[in-house]
């Protein structure tokens, strides 16, 4: 599982690998690989970076996907369901 922690948005708490493992073991989040599989069904491309954040009590994976057309996109997905919450071009 790849979980990279980099500075995130205001109002978000970045979570480290130990916390991610604890949440995964407790069933509160899905494994990153499962989330990537779900997201790639809607956003075709390669995973470049990932981080796990907590925003207002909701765990969110922030994924950077390099699309086949060369665009880099940031996708926010609910870490417990894989539902895509936001897609935006990463400048």
Image (spheres, rainbow, N blue to C red):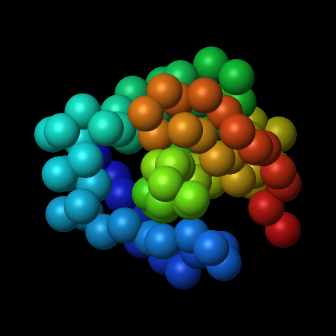
Q: Position of residue 54 (x, y in %)?
A: 48, 60
Residue 5 place in picture, x, y as percent? 42, 71
Answer with left or right where residue 20 lies relative to residue 90. Answer: left
Residues 57 and 9: in front is 57
Q: Nearer the viewer, residue 63 or 84?
A: 84
| Image: 62 above or below 69 | below
Q: Nearer the viewer, residue 9 or 38?
A: 9
* Identity of the residue furthest to the front in this view: 57
* Identity of the residue drawn at 55% across and 38% down: 78
Work out whether residue 80 or residue 2 is closer to the camera in this orientation and state it.
80
Disc tally is: 0
Q: Is residue 29 above or below residue 52?
A: above
Instruction: Please name the residue shown 70% across and 22% down the image.
Output: 42
What residue do we see at 31% from left, 38% from top? Answer: 28
- Which corner quadrant holds the C terminus? bottom right
Residue 30 horizontal/vertical position (percent):
35, 33
Residue 66 visible in the shown view: no
Q: With 5 as the anchor, is 2 left or right in this view?
A: left
| Residue 42 visible in image | yes
Q: Tell me residue 50's x, y (percent).
A: 49, 56
Q: Quadrant of residue 80?
A: top left
């Amino acid at each position: 599982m790849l979980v990279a922690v980099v500075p995130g948005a205001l109002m978000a708490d970045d979570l480290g690998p130990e916390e991610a493992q604890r949440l995964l073991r407790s069933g509160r989040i899905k494994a990153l690989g499962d989330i990537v599989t779900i997201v790639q069904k809607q956003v075709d491309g390669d995973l470049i970076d990932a981080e796990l954040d907590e925003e207002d009590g909701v765990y969110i994976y922030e994924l950077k996907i390099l699309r086949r057309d060369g665009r880099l996109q940031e996708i926010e997905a609910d870490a417990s369901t894989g539902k895509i919450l936001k897609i935006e071009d990463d400048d």
